[in-house]
Amino acid sequence: MKKQKLRILSVIFALILIITSIPITVIAETTEDGFEYSILDDGTAEIIKYTGGATELDIPSEIDGYTVTSIGQTAFQDCTGLTSITIPDSVTIIGYGAFTECNELTSVTIPDSVTIIGSYAFGYCLDYDKSNPLLFLGTIFGVTNYRLKRINGFTIYGVPGTTAEKYANNNGFEFVDINTVVPAEPTTHEPTTEAPTTQEPTTAEPTTEELSTEEPATGIPTVNGDIDIKDGADIKTVDIVGTKAVEIKSEQSVKDIISGLKNENAKIVDKDGKDIAESGFVGTGCKVQILDKDGKAVNEYTVLVPMDVDGDGKILASDARTSLRASAKLDKLENVFFAAANADGNNELTAADARKILRVSAKIDTV
Ligand SMILES: [Ca+2]
Ligand SMILES: [Ca+2]
């Protein structure tokens, strides 16, 4: 009898153990590094909250074996320490206000996998001062309206034509094509250690020594040295902050330019004063030299090819990149190089100039 009672009891205990250990549908789990997530119907994960406190955060594409496809609404709200985030390309949905109030975040790269971005997901912060206890209490009790304002200068890097670009446009944020323009580390303002690509000002160049404008040539009447352009030629003189310059179109050879001049004695050299082959393209920074009868340079014009920032005579994505770096103060551009980078001609280098150059290089826009 006693034995049977014991057996019944142990069966009951075992049942209780089994019942209590059966997991009742997982609602949310939190990882060690602070990602709270839930499992969606399709067996993938949505990050619903982040409490990790990282400043530079790589959001994982997989958590505990589940693919992360969604960043839930307000998941990273108020993560004020975040200065940079990386969103994995497993993510397709970013919810309402996902990164709102991340006040130190000034840019984000959104992969083209993302097809839905909720309102105020990026680039917004609260329009009241949380540190003011009265205002904050007012907000809690509903006195102050919950208002959001845009974070100044917020930049979105992404693929043109995707949801990322639409979000940027709809919210008035700067959009930069990630495929061709390397983001210029927007959070750090220090110049990188790599050698700057800016060309040196032209003052110390050997060709300037050859100029003989002050010294009239002995006996022989001198050429006045002014550039003389044929009608209809694709070349014109421009004055860039006191520099005598000529503007030409991209992808023109030395021969093309020389044939547009009335001056019979002229030659084109590169920015270092070296000869360029007749078939070579003339780029920003090259010099058109007007020569006297002895072949001496009596005058010199610096070439500007709008949007050719690196001086190879072609408008390519690399020119957009150089312009962008300069607009982010990572490089310095002067004179004709600044003029070439300043695609919209408004006297200020911004990401808009780089975007314009990029569009021209991709043949979406014309010069
Ligand atoms: Ca170029
Ligand atoms: Ca500009």
Image (spheres, rainbow, N blue to C red):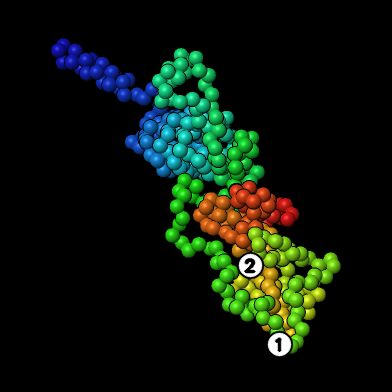
Q: Is residue 161 visible?
A: yes
**Residue 112 visible at all:** no
- Using a 10 Å C-alpha cutoff, classify the residue at mark 2 as few (fewer than 14 neighbours), some (14 to 19) or many (20 or more): many
Amino acid marked by disc 2 = Gly
Residue at 55% across, 30% down: 149
**Mark in the foreground, 1 or 2:** 1
Q: Which mark is residue 303?
A: none
Q: Which residue is mark 2?
A: 285
- Given residues 129 and 221, the one toward you in this image is 221
Number of disc labels: 2
Residue depicted at 57% across the width and 74% down the height: 205
Of callouts 1 and 2, which one flags the residue occurring earlier in the amino acid sequence? 1
Q: Residue at x 45, y 52 (%)?
A: 190
Give me the disc on residue 218. 1
Amino acid at dot 1: Thr
Place of residue 315 in the rendered image (x, y in percent of width and height, measured from the top left): 67, 60
